[in-house]
Image (spheres, rainbow, N blue to C red):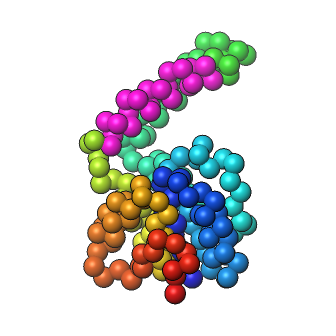
Amino acid sequence: MNVLFLALGAGRRRAVVEESARVVANGGTATVVIAMAKQWKNETFAPGVTVLDSSLLHQDELLWRIERLMVYRGPEFVLRRTFGKRGNSAVRAYRNKVADRFHKRAFLPVHKRLRKDVSSKLLAGHITRAPKAYEWIVVTDTRSMPEAVDVLNELGPNNRIGLAWSAEHLA
């Protein structure tokens, strides 16, 4: 059984870790899609559980690539060239004080407003390109529910993926 856990809200972290481990222990495969890796840093997943940060799905998108170039890579290149050996500390300071703040406070809100349906399309694309077809999507928290609905709409009426609130409900 191939199961995709949508855990975008990180509300039931311990349950997600245990249920994904149970799926793998029963001979299946489990992929956990998370929104913020920082919220999950204290959790240890069982061997065989794949954890996918949803921001990785956006990496090939043109807007994200332009932002990476203009906000991160370009200024960091200039700082390294300018400060020489002290360049790495200057890059860390720039990233913490300027680039990350811009990304969180300016880029992400504008991107979400302009491209509301992008993440569901990217997630549906991940599901269709998976080497082994997913049989179930487990929605682990309330924040993931609208995303799961959008993904199922994106996949169309002919998909055979079941939707469950917990791995205990899988047949």
153 horizontally vs 83: left or right: left
Residue 123 in which image quadrant: bottom left
Give, as a single range, the part of the protein colored magenta. Answer: 91-112
Q: Residue 159: percent from the left, percent from the top?
A: 35, 80
Q: Residue 2: percent from the left, percent from the top?
A: 55, 78
Residue 21 in which image quadrant: bottom right
Question: Which residue is pictured at 32% across the width and 63% down the height?
Answer: 150
Residue 47 in which image quadrant: bottom right
The prevailing secondary structure element of the residues shown in magenta is helix
Frontmost residue, 97 versus 21: 21
29 horizontally vs 122: left or right: right
162 horizontally vs 49: left or right: left
Frontmost residue, 19 versus 83: 19
Question: Which residue is pictured at 57% across the width and 24% down the height?
Answer: 96
Question: Which residue is pictured at 41% across the width and 41% down the height?
Answer: 64
Q: Residue 43: percent from the left, percent from the top?
A: 68, 53
